[in-house]
Image (cartoon, rainbow, N blue to C red):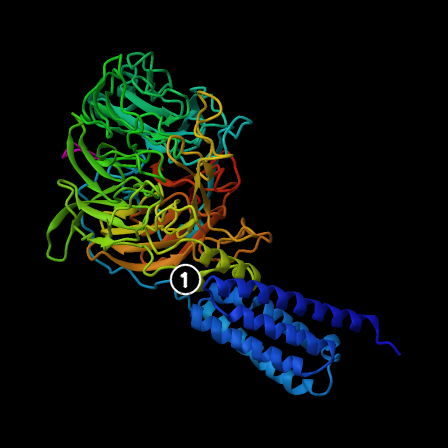
Amino acid sequence: MKRASPSNLARWLSILFAVLSGMYLLVGGGWLVAVGGSPYYVMAGIALLAIAWLIARGNGLALSLYALLLIGTLIWAVVEAGFDFWALAPRTDILVLFGIWLLLPFVYRLFDASARRGAVALVVCLVLTGITLAYAAFNDPQELNGTVAATAPTPSAQADSQPGDWTAYGRTQAGTRYSPLTQINQQNVKDLQVAWTFETGDKKGPNDPIEITDEVTPIKVGDMLYLCSPHQILFALDAATGKEKWRFDPRLKADPSFQHVTCRGVSYHETQAAAAAKDAAARQALPACARRVILPVNDGHLFELDAATGQRCAGFGNNGDLDLQHLQPVKTAGQYEPTSPPVVTDKIIVIAGSVTDNYSTHEPSGVIRGFDVETGKLVWAFDPGSDTPNAIPDDQHAFTLNSPNSWAPSAYDAKLDLVYLPMGVTTPDIWGGNRTPQDERYASGLLALHASTGKLAWFYQTVHHDLWDMDLPAQPTIADITDRNGNVIPAIYAPAKTGNIFVLDRRTGTPIVPAPEQPVPQGAAQGDRVSPTQPFSQLTFRPTKNLTGADMWGATMYDQLACRVIFHRLRYEGTFTPPSEQGTLVFPGNLGMFEWGGLAVDTDRQLAIANPIALPFVSRLIRRGPGNPEQPAASGQGGTGTEVGIQPQYGVPFGVTLNPFLSPVGLPCKQPAWGYVAAIDLKTNQVVWKKRIGTVRDSAPVPLPFKMGMPMLGGPMTTAGHVFFIGATADNYLRAFSTDTGDELWHARLPAGGQATPMTYEANGKQFVVIAAGGHGSFGTKLGDYVIAYALPNK
């Protein structure tokens, strides 16, 4: 008599799983062994095929052999990955589930009497695996637990007379992102609630590129909040209520060739008379544009608006509009884009801009310019690719093609009259065989210029002959630090994509924290070269060891095996492995361990908050030929409209593809964490604590809030209340953490991605925390148009 159909189904499902899994692991594992990887998968595949045969015969030895496979896998996993839950999970998850399946009554009764001993062994192995995973879940080896030592605050040299304001992108032009406000603190931050929400109405349009982003950090001056939306519409809001006072639309005409449509912020300037006007009557008596807001626009324009009314400042440029394309060698809209707010001194606007990455050798100049803040007259220029950087061309000439550019926000020390610019590299970024010494003299490093004259003060290069787009991506931070001997050091902190934080004397550019030159991998693509050494700061979050096959990851053993095969087929010899036609694993990746969010530095306690990320990329050089032409098909075409995928690099022998290192199912191939928050004691340059941040709630097919440590775009903001705030992660949250321990104290669900740096201010006696929640196109978070303020409830 035939057995009941459920038993037959259970038998065939069990055999099918074991056969298909065994064949996949055997074939894929054989491929992995052939490229130099672990033999585990071959052995596991053989074991599963043997188990399938035993199941088909109803032989209870199947359970004994499966128990042996499970415990062997657990031992192998711990030896490879240690007690890291998210590293152990994909090595064991499928096997644990199938082991439980085999013990279910309707499956277990398929076996003969010899199954009893195997079942006991399998239960023991499952329990041991569960205990190991539970231990790993509560003892994360990637996290560092510690507590910031309680010390007396050191009065900040950058302290100001407006503690309730946030007058520049980094609160002040020192770029600290630190507020002295204390109303919100570690004890009450859990009570924060939405105070007001403002919707800009500025959303992605049909002609926008993929890379449309809402990265703005508002500024607050007096009773007004100023911010720009992705299309550079400028809004003035009542700081206490979020009600709109006025708006200005520059009518940006973006198209899909623009590499960016974004606005990180605006700048502010006021005359001495305006600064002295303390009451409403005195402010109303001020002439027009005594207080002004400066707005950069992605089509190469700079506007000045009266801060009170939003009217154009008629005496600036052409009725408030300054054409930054003047004297540019290429004037195609979107190829030169000022995406970050300029530095503004008492007399000069210092502005630089982004140029299209990896497009061609015929692109605009990355020239840095100083304009009179009231008239818009060009006062000075610093053209980094020119033989004579300070020379200003006449109307029959132009600045230098493809000069290195500075796209991230700059910092300013008023006492030294020095502006500090994080520099990028001459385009195209991923091949440098045609670059001249002038092209690279001021590339990929920190440039200090005299703000009044544009004359060079010093330059410190952080990457030599940059072939990885490893520019300085963030606003540097100015802080006076007291060392262990009581000496006050005028420092500047420059976080780099490489994970290094370069700490320099801001007067001279001399390293304070050593950054010795170290040998790096050699062997450039044909026609190119590689610098024999690179500087490696001793204050760093860069990887302490090279990646190996054991660092590859997946949701299951199947995609983890695929990632291992892909990894071993790529060229990878550690940090600064040169680009190749084979395909190079770039880690730290092209996105960088640090991006434009920068550091938040509590200058009173001499403590820095950082949010490094760890997401490898893959670059692959593509020779010219079919499908990869020498020149664009249409003359006058702009950029690529994206920073990932195929990049043409017209004018050099190779195009390039740039993509995150992902598995065939779209998950990162490197095991998590991919993002952290951490605290650095700046007196000792030691990391005090480091914690994973972010969940897969908005990334996984099933919205589960697993804390894995997510990639980020955006930065932290910290306060004297010993609390710091950060959005940035690939899940839609704003979070608050203790600066003392790194413990999460509060979070709020955002209606869209929070790829912006938050800020804080005081209005009518109440402290607010504000973040733009508008998402990020290429980062893949939900787009929106929200600006949200949080505050404590009224007593």
Q: Quadrant of the N terminus?
A: bottom right
Give residue 550's quadrant in the image. Answer: bottom left
Q: Quadrant of the C terminus?
A: top left
Does residue 165 appear anywhere in the picture?
no
Q: Residue furthest right?
A: 1
Whole-percent x, y for residue 422 in the image: 27, 38
Residue closest to the eye, 308 or 661: 661
Give residue 171's quadrant in the image. Answer: top left
Give residue 268's quadrant in the image. Answer: top left
Per the image, is 761 magenta? Answer: no
Q: Is residue 620 left or right of residue 24?
A: left
Count of numbered badges drawn on the protein: 1
Residue that appears at 36% across and 32% down: 265
Residue closest to the eye, 124 or 542: 542
Q: Can you say whether 353 is above or below 460 in the image?
A: above
User: Label 1 amino acid?
Assistant: Thr
Whole-percent x, y for residue 231 in the image: 45, 26
Q: Is residue 485 left or right of residue 768?
A: left
Per the image, is 418 magenta? Answer: yes
Q: Can you say whether 369 is above or below 463 in the image?
A: above
Residue closest to the eye, 720 or 369: 369
Q: Residues within 10 Å of mark 1 (few under 14, many from 20)?
A: some
Q: Can you say whether 307 is above or below 598 in the image?
A: above
Dot 1 lies on which element? loop
Does residue 503 appear anywhere in the picture?
yes
Residue that appears at 52% across and 73% down: 73
Whole-percent x, y for residue 518 in the image: 23, 54
Q: Is residue 495 left or right of residue 63?
A: left
Whole-percent x, y for residue 481 in the image: 17, 49
- The range drawn in magenta is 412-419
Give the residue pinned by disc 1. Answer: 548
